[in-house]
Image: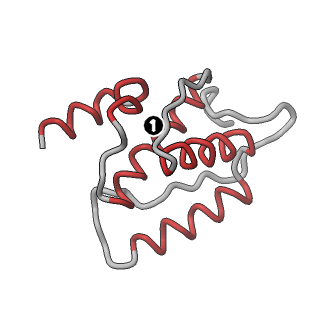
């Protein structure tokens, strides 16, 4: 059985869990592996969370902030998206995003 915290549509059973490489362990080809993982996530992940991720990325690229009502899984998706933005661009997300969704990342960025 899977953990109750794993979000699954009613009637579905998990057959595998996949996780990307840890971004704090930079390795050659990390951006390529990240892109490959994103393709798997788009194909097999929860569509609502994928769409949320794309919405946040679009807002980040447009330099806009939006307070998005989400459940805890959506908030975790936003936090992951912000951290991946930092990993891929080398630039911290805007302060309003970090203050609202990822205070630990905000504190870490301020400390550096």
Specify few, some or many for label 1: CA neighbours under 10 Å numbering under 14, 14-19, or 20 or more: many
Quadrant of image for the N terminus: top right
Q: Position of residue 5 (x, y in %)?
A: 60, 28
Q: How many marks overall?
A: 1
Which quarter of the figure has residue 22? bottom left
Would residue 96 be found to the left or right of residue 66 on screen?
A: left
Q: Residue at x 73, y 39 (%)?
A: 48
Q: Nearer the viewer, residue 21 or 17?
A: 21
Q: Position of residue 57 (x, y in %)?
A: 54, 48
Q: Residue at x 80, y 34 (%)?
A: 9
| Farthest-out residue, right | 11
Would residue 72 be found to the left or right of residue 91 on screen?
A: right
* Colour basis: secondary structure
Q: Residue at x 61, y 51 (%)?
A: 17
| Farthest-out residue, bottom | 28
Q: Residue at x 49, y 38 (%)?
A: 64
Q: Position of residue 49 (x, y in %)?
A: 66, 40
Quadrant of image for the C terminus: top left
* Pointer 1 residue: 79
Instruction: Tell me the element at label 1.
Output: helix
Up the image or down, 80 lies above or below 99; here it is: below
Q: Nearer the viewer, residue 61 or 74?
A: 61
Q: Position of residue 102 (x, y in %)?
A: 37, 30
């Amino acid at each position: 059985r899977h953990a109750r915290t794993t979000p699954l549509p009613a009637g579905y059973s998990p057959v595998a869990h996949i996780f990307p490489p840890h971004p704090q362990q930079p390795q050659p080809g990390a951006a390529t592996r990240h892109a490959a993982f994103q393709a798997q996530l788009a194909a097999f992940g929860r569509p609502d969370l994928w769409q949320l991720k794309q919405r946040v990325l679009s807002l980040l690229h447009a330099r806009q902030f939006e307070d998005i009502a989400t459940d805890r899984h959506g908030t975790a998706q936003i936090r992951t998206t912000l951290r991946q933005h930092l990993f891929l661009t080398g630039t911290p997300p805007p302060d309003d995003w970090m203050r609202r969704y990822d205070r630990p990342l905000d504190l870490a960025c301020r400390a550096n």
